[in-house]
Amino acid sequence: MTVKQKNKMIFPKLIASIIILFSLSIILFSFKYKFISFLYPENIENANSLIPLYAKNQYQKTNEFSNKIAIKNGCGKKHLGLIYKRYLLDLGYDITETSNATHPNGDYHFGHSATKILFHKKNENSAISLANELGVQHSQILEEYKETNFHDLTLILGQNYINLKSYKTAKKFNPFKND
């Protein structure tokens, strides 16, 4: 075998060895300085808030009942429905819809002065529980029975949203921090 042939056989092995050593050094460096964050769940932002997503709220714990809640933005505040959706999901509620409030003719209706909870299918107790959680006055709990209604409760966020006891906590769930 000539020297050139020996060099041809050694060169690929040398390159492969260098690549393997380089890869191992990157991996070790990443572990040492925690660059691979998915391996360290304590570093994941909001990791602790994921656990309650699967937890039940207090009413559901005591009554073994799951509420389907529709959230309607009745005041026009940008992202308010999404903020309350994320907040209520964190508390363990089942949010099935988030949208703007509308008139029966289909036009948007942002003139709701007070936050209301509409209960459907005889779910007044769960409406009271939600009202207590959010700080909605019990006088704003109304029955709206529709046989075809998919939801158990409808939360209509009114212009008094800023006065709700839950708003200070709920606004922490705003994914759009600049709005």
Image: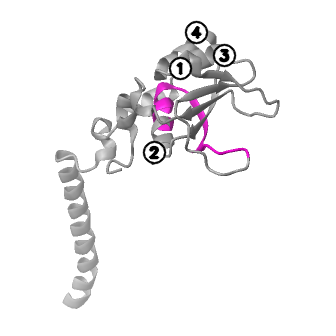
Figure label count:
4
Q: For the residue marked with disc 4, what is the amino acid?
A: Thr
Q: Quadrant of residue 48?
A: top left
Please tell me the numbered disc located at residue 62.
4
Alpha carbon distance from label 3 to label 1: 10 Å
Please tell me the numbered disc located at residue 77.
2
Q: For the residue marked with disc 3, what is the amino acid?
A: Glu
Res 19 seen here = yes
Q: Earlier in the sequence, mark 3 or mark 1?
A: 3
Mark 1 and mark 2 residues within 8 Å of each other at the beta carbon = no
Mark 2 and mark 4 residues within 8 Å of each other at the beta carbon = no
For label 1, the residue is: 131
Alpha carbon distance from label 2 to label 3: 27 Å
Question: Viewer-nearest of labels 2 and 4?
Answer: 2
Badge 1 marks a residue whose secondary structure is helix
Badge 4 marks a residue whose secondary structure is helix
Mark 4 and mark 1 residues within 8 Å of each other at the beta carbon = no
For label 3, the residue is: 124
Q: Which residues are magenta?
A: 85-104
Mark 3 surroundings within 10 Å by alpha-carbon count, few (fewer than 14), some (14 through 19), many (20 or more): some
- Seen from the viewer's position, the closer of residues 123 and 76 is 76
